Image (tube, rainbow, N blue to C red):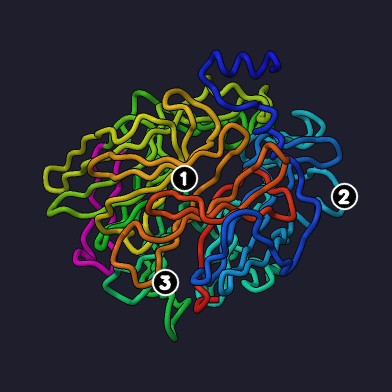
Amino acid sequence: MTSLQEKNILNNQVFDKADWSSAYQNVEVELENQSLKISKGNIIPELNGTLFRNGPGILERDGQWLHHPFDGDGMITAIKFKNGKASFTNKFVKTEGFLKEQNVNKFIYRGVFGTQKKGGVINNAFNLKLKNIANTHVIKLGDELLALWEAAGPHSLDPNNLETNGLTTLKGVLKKNEAFSAHPKVDFNSNSADEVLITFGVQTGPTSTIRLMEFSNSGKNSGQILFDRKYKLKGFAFLHDFAITTNWAIFLQNAIDFNPLPFVMGQKGAAQCLKSNPKKTAKFFIVPRDSGLFRGQPPIIIDAPEGFVFHHVNAYENDSNIILDSIFYDDFPSVGPDEDFRNIDFDNYPAGKLKRSLIDLKGKSSKLVSISNQTCEFAVTNPNFLGIKSNYSWMACTERKTGNAPLQAIKKINLETKEELFWSAAPKGFVSEPIMVPKEGSKYEDEGYLLILIWNGSRRGSDLIILNSSNLEELATYELPINIPHGLHGSWANEKLI
């Protein structure tokens, strides 16, 4: 046993940091329609559709490492199932910035999360142009597959071979490269159509503007915009995610300040200039959906609890209340200018905890209750229950029950009883966001499949694990033909949609 392993055991840790950090490597190849063989378990004949995943695929050029993996160029993975048989495709999003840097094999753009061009402050000061890295999410809208990065416009891809078509304005809805959220919601419970994709864009400043958009995502009008409205709110708005109910879109404006001077002077990335302000109060900005019962009414603004939120899980209405589940941090987590993201001390970073906000629309108040104190992220619900009451959530979590650490397990939690089930990839495995695929025709909310990309530290490679979403039984494992770095978000498209 090595001294590092001994130290980890003494600290109640069940991982070797070298196993975790070994996932951070460049993707060297692009493959198309390569057959996958199952290495463990059995095929699932009723699984028909495609798992799309996005995340950084370039982490180093010419010996220079990114300061933060979130600055990496987006690479899309598509794993297609037909009668249970699987095939694999991966392609980089061929953004303008990716092609330029690929041609010279060096970083020529600064990154939002701290990556600098070579040459120090002199070569970075007043250079404010950022590349659209299209690395955060991937989702279908109409006949387009969209690679998303919230600070700029979406890139359109061919959903069959992942070839990049280029920036899209969504049939003229967006201005060229207009900001478009990386967290759209597919709503199956809307009043306006069978399936709706609702999303937003933000223009930040002393007064910020939210543009809320709803698109048809099924039938002959798929891809067409249905509703489009802008709202203004006071102050700088850092909005990575939002939540929906049938009648409302809910935004949490974190109590955070942005001081652009270090970014302008070439000392920090833009995200490193964000800082929580304990003298401010976070706000819920609750916007009436044009497809709902309160169309045309003004937004409702309510004080929010302390803490910082990247991701929401789900929300629903209960009389005049909104119940909102989110992942709360004590503070905004950021990799400092002198830190190496491959060797961070997890104990020094705030941990995400699953909590519930009880929002009283009439009394204009809110309170926060804890659902689980275990560190977690990337929590999802059954997509058919988005915006309405759901009893279950699935999420990536730490193997240890207290403290911060890499995500090595999948947890299913009953949001009412707090009963928990676990599946673990520890000590050598590291998990990503689970994608829940409901079993077609089932009347049970938790019946279906969880699809999870795993970094397998034992063989230094990537696996796809499929779990039974009800009991977390491991059903199938596929060893993937390329190594995929720790990634971000993904989606599932049924066969009839692709």
Q: Quadrant of residue 411?
A: top left
- Can you tell which mark lies on residue 215? 3
User: Type of residue at label 1?
Assistant: Phe
Compared to residue 243, the image places residue 334 above or below, namely: above
62 magenta-colored: no
- Mark 1–mark 3 Cα distance, whole angstroms, equals 24 Å
Measured as percent of width and height from the top left, residue 221 is found at 43, 83
- Mark 2–mark 3 Cα distance, whole angstroms, equals 39 Å
- Identify the residue shown where x is 41% and y is 61%: 448
- Work out whether residue 451 or residue 164 is closer to the camera in this orientation and state it: 451
Q: How many marks?
A: 3
In magenta, the rendered stretch is 283-303
User: Type of residue at label 3?
Assistant: Phe
Compared to residue 301, the image places residue 214 above or below, namely: below
Q: Quadrant of the N terminus?
A: top right
Q: Secondary structure at mark 2?
A: helix
Q: Residue furthest front?
A: 41
Q: Quadrant of the C terminus?
A: bottom right
The residue pinned by badge 1 equals 378
- Work out whether residue 205 or residue 403 is closer to the camera in this orientation and state it: 403
- Can you tell which mark lies on residue 104? 2
